[in-house]
Amino acid sequence: MDKPSRKEGRKTNTKYVIAAVAIAALIIVAAFVYVYQQGPSAEQLAALHNLVDDRGYVTSMDAIPNKIVSLAPSTTEIVFALGLDDKVVGVSEYCDYPYNFSAWIAAGNMTSIGDFSNPNMEVIASLEPDLILATGGVQGETVTTLRNLGYKVLVLDPPDIAGVLRDIELVGNATGKRTEALELINNIQSRIDAVVNKVAVSAFKPTVYYEVWYDPTSLWTAGAEAWQNELIEKAGGVNIFADQDLAYFQSSSEAVIQRNPDVIILPEEGMGKGEPFWVSIDAVKARPGWSSISAVQNNRIYTVDSNTISRAGPRVADAIEELAKAFHPELF
């Protein structure tokens, strides 16, 4: 009997390899299809119940939501960080991260629900959302109205970093993204821990003045209850107004001069839409009496992205890293 040539043997082996790869691919595809057809897991379904938001309100979802409306920039950042891009049908006009939503809205790929403090109820109703994410403060009345209309609403208004991480888990539970939420939380916490450990080697903790915004009659800054106070501490600094048991309040130029901060942090842009709540570094240096301040004398005035440092959301690690580099440039 004639034996097959080596060339013919190689051809036969190649055919077997191709066939094996094709079969393996079909098995993988079939597995994905099977999992998809099976729907949500028991763990995902269990996580939809007894969702407690930051106002203590308990909500249970009937199913994993397919349409989500986000009323605040911070909540929008959370849902997109969890990969829920295809589920978001409406955002407020202040939502601008991680995408330029105004361009999406203009193209008809997203709907604006209007102003942050006074969203358009008719537009929200037209979107038929399964879940609405809101924040505290000025949205309190809006939340009450929406709940009275029968909508599922979660209020995310975390007072600190731990609260942000809880809210990420809450949204993950409410949307079938618990696994993704826990991964995101772990990533954020790891980055924060890395900064805390790095700045801990420095015996020097610079005193910091954080200017929330400026107007001709007063300076707005952050006290002990403000979100930014904890960010400053984690980044290895000391807020000069940490002794004030307030969140945001009006201070005076004289008070800042007296407390003599080592570092001054300014927002890169205004906190309000189109409102001049910010000033340049040169303008700060030129303020009467400020030439005696250590931060001015040593050119330690820095600008930070106002949205990153003001929004209690998934970019909290970004904010801490940016502040730490300003406070301790020798360590980075």
Image (cartoon, rainbow, N blue to C red):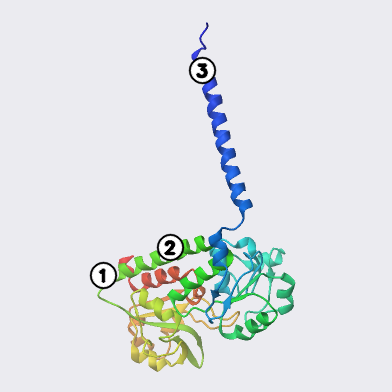
Is residue 95 shown left or right of residue 186? Answer: right
- Judging by the rendered image, the residue that carries numbered circle 2 is 187
Q: Which residue is pictured at 53% across the width and 28% down the height?
A: 17
Q: Considering only vertical position in the picture, is 66 above or below 214? A: above
- The x and y percentages for residue 244 are 39, 90
Q: CA distance from mark 3 to mark 1?
A: 66 Å
Say what secondary structure mark 1 lies in: loop
Q: Which residue is pictured at 56% across the width and 58% down the height?
A: 41
Q: Sequence order check: which comes first, mark 3 or mark 1?
A: 3
Q: CA distance from mark 3 to mark 2?
A: 51 Å
The picture quadrant where one finds residue 174 is bottom right
Q: Considering only vertical position in the picture, is 135 above or below 18? A: below
- The x and y percentages for residue 88 are 64, 66
Q: Residue furthest top?
A: 1
- Judging by the rendered image, the residue that carries numbered circle 1 is 201
Say what secondary structure mark 3 lies in: helix
Residue type at mark 3 is Gly
- The x and y percentages for residue 121 are 71, 79
Mark 2, Cα crowd under 10 Å, few <14 / some 14-19 / many 20+, is: some
Say what secondary structure mark 2 lies in: helix
Residue type at mark 2 is Asn
- The x and y percentages for residue 46 are 55, 65
State the quadrant of the C terminus: bottom left
Residue type at mark 1 is Val
- Judging by the rendered image, the residue that carries numbered circle 3 is 9
Q: CA distance from mark 1 to mark 2?
A: 22 Å
Give the label, 3 or 2, closer to the camera: 3
Front residue of 27 and 287: 27
Give the label, 1 or 2, closer to the camera: 2
- Contact between marks 3 and 2 (CB within 8 A): the answer is no
Q: Which residue is pictured at 60% across the width and 79% down the height?
A: 273
Q: Which residue is pictured at 67% across the width and 76% down the height?
A: 151
